[in-house]
Amino acid sequence: MSENTVFPNVDILLSTFNGEKFLSELLDSLIAQDYLHWRLIWRDDGSNDDTFKLMQAWQAVHPEKVLSLENSGQHLGLVASHNALVVASEADYLLFCDQDDVWFPRKISKLLFRIQQIEKDSGKQIPLLAHSDLMVTDEHLNVLHKSLWRYQNLNVHQASHVYLMKNVVSACACVFNKAAAQIAFPVPEEASVHDHWLALVVATQGKISVCNEALMYYRQHQSNTVGAFSKINPFRFSRWRQHIRRIRHTTLGKSQQGEALLRRFSTELYEKDKQRIQALKLLPYSSLFQRIRLIFKYQLGIGGLLNSIVLIAFSGNKEDLGG
């Protein structure tokens, strides 16, 4: 590259909470990135272990690499903490990271290349996101599965309307541009997690692209806020009642999130997307026959025939599950 090459500004966003056990491995993996033009914006969400001290010590060694938010240490909660991080960033591109993960050395450069490729066709004013696969490990980084996408049987090339019901983007494995940050954040209260909301907004208002390789270790341990669930085995009946309850609960959350999307982008959404959100809202109040009609007419399935059957059968009133 020439001396006049302009490198894009990249902000890595980290919200910590009682993460002392694995935090050093994450930070080491950030320093090992082959793309050097990044900054870490960090806030602690009220840890009561040595996380705050570890981060302060690391910041003292790398002061040019770290911005600590003034409200660090105040407990805001997962979504609000990430809201604060995004609002503090003015970078061209943003990446979330989790305190217990380990990045491969070329993660930033490969995701950056991917999003810049679609930016050439779409322009910087369009909300864009690129995301990669993840390698699932145990807490000691022993590989459990080489692909989270295959482990969860995810269709990462799904159509944009499917994001209303099913998210396939992991926050810690994506990069998004400033245009996406500006329209998706702050995340509304109705959204349960920031990555689904971000993916839903970009899918309906911009473009999502895929990097078809794992670029990080996705560590599984007892303290995971959101873990890697494998697909349900239809012959393990002991898991079905729990699965049914989870689908019912998340369906309600997706309906509320869809309504928030409708309020924020009422003039930008396609009419079919507006109708799909309204249909989802009606599911709990509909008869079995009406649920079948709504789910198939508006493509409200949630991945696989078995999951769709569960949605049809158990997305009605609470009597369906005995309270």
Image (spheres, rainbow, N blue to C red):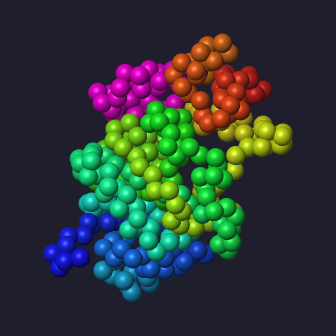
* Residue 138 in which image quadrant: bottom right
In the image, which residues are magenta? 255-283
Residue ID at (17%, 79%): 3
Residue ID at (61%, 56%): 148
* Residue 64 in which image quadrant: bottom left
Q: Where is residue 1 in the image (x, y as percent from the top left)?
A: 23, 76
Q: Is residue 265 above or below residue 232?
A: above
Residue ID at (59%, 52%): 149
Instruction: Give yes or no for residue 284 being in the magenta stretch.
Output: no
* Residue 201 in which image quadrant: top left
Question: In this view, which residue lies farthest toward the bottom?
Answer: 61
Left or right of 310? Residue 106 is: left
Q: Where is residue 195 in the image (x, y as percent from the top left)?
A: 47, 49
Quarter of the picture holding the C terminus: top right
Q: Where is residue 112 in the image (x, y as percent from the top left)?
A: 35, 62
Q: Where is residue 61 in the image (x, y as percent from the top left)?
A: 39, 87
Instruction: Give yes or no for residue 281 being in the magenta stretch.
Output: yes
Residue 243 in sight from this viewpoint: yes
